[in-house]
Amino acid sequence: MRTVVGSSTANASRYDPKAIPLAWREIDTPKTYKKLTIGILAEDPEYPLQPPVRRSLEEAVSRLLSAEHLLVRLPHDAANSGAGLGGRLSFQYYSILSSPDVKPLDQVLGEPLVTSLAKGVHPFTGGFPVDPALDLPQRLHALTMARDAYAAAWHALWREYELDVVLAPGAATTAVPHDSYGVPVYTCMWNLIDYPAGIIPFEKASKDVDSNPQKAVGPFEPDYNPDATNGAPCAIQVVAPRLQDEECLQAMRIIDKVLKNPDFF
């Protein structure tokens, strides 16, 4: 990123009118090891984490605490900042100008839809946050207001707890058996409000440690099968506020060092 964004000859805004013309910022790194204030994203009851994902996140929390970082358990606020709300708002934005029904795709493609798409997994659990019966201008206005309120709720959380970054699961599941995917609420929520985020591989699913099967809560999410996902890689997600890509990468570097060698610090 430093090479691409920081080079005057490779500045993306010279070639892409949508790119933000900001130079790469060098983040001052203290001579001593920097301690972070990290918010832990609350698990959304609509999209509960599968056992290996929950275990990997909690192990990351434990190691970061041992390295003397400050960790804050963020409250789950479904009505204002929940992952499920972010997912529903994201999907309604993405789909507002498209067909409300994906079934005609099989006629266009000339072959049956894969199982997960044929289920009609959207608009996520809980329905549309904005009345789909509104005409298009009214829906766009209502969605913009709802997105701005969602962004304001997250901005307030960052300020209230003086956070550097948020630690979250990359998804509710690990890699799943073919054609059994669910919906990506834990990532598209950040796309909605334009917060940079990155994934750090950490831990693996184990049928011995994570031995209890788990039925999915929502009708479209995959069940957890210990045998089917045994050995699948897990990961954590690190999120920073809007336009703080450099801070996000710096925090990822610090967190990754702790996870790889928890006794070093």
Image (spheres, grey):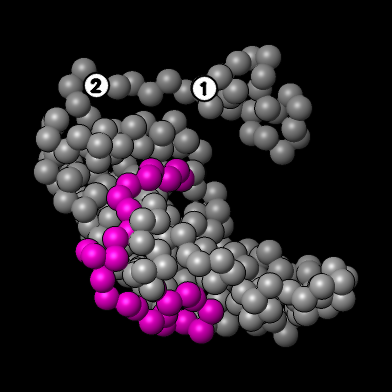
Quadrant in the rendering for residue 180: bottom right
Position in image of residue 27 (x %, y %)? 38, 24
Dominant SS type (magenta): loop
Residue name at image x 72 percent, y 38 percent: 18
Q: Please state, as top left, top right, bottom left or bottom right, where the C terminus lies in the image.
A: top left
Task: Judge whether 9 appears above or below 141 on screen.
Answer: above
- Mark 1 falls on what kind of element? helix
Quadrant in the rendering for residue 97: bottom right
Residue name at image x 76 percent, y 27 percent: 15
Position in image of residue 91 (x %, y %)? 62, 68
Callout 1: few (<14), some (14-19), or many (20+) C-alpha neighbours within 10 Å? few
Q: Which residue is mark 1?
A: 2
Task: Judge whether 5 appears above or below 154 on screen.
Answer: above
Q: Which residues are magenta?
A: 197-224
Residue name at image x 72 percent, y 85 percent: 133
The answer, for residue 261, to whether it is visible in the render is yes
Task: Judge whether 17 appears above or below 23 on screen.
Answer: below
Residue 206, label in figure:
none
Left or right: 209 in relation to 175: left
Left or right: 262 in relation to 242: left
Q: Which residue is mark 2?
A: 30
* Residue type at tag 1: Arg
* First along the sequence among labels 2 and 1: 1
Q: Is residue 217 magenta?
A: yes
* Residue type at tag 2: Pro
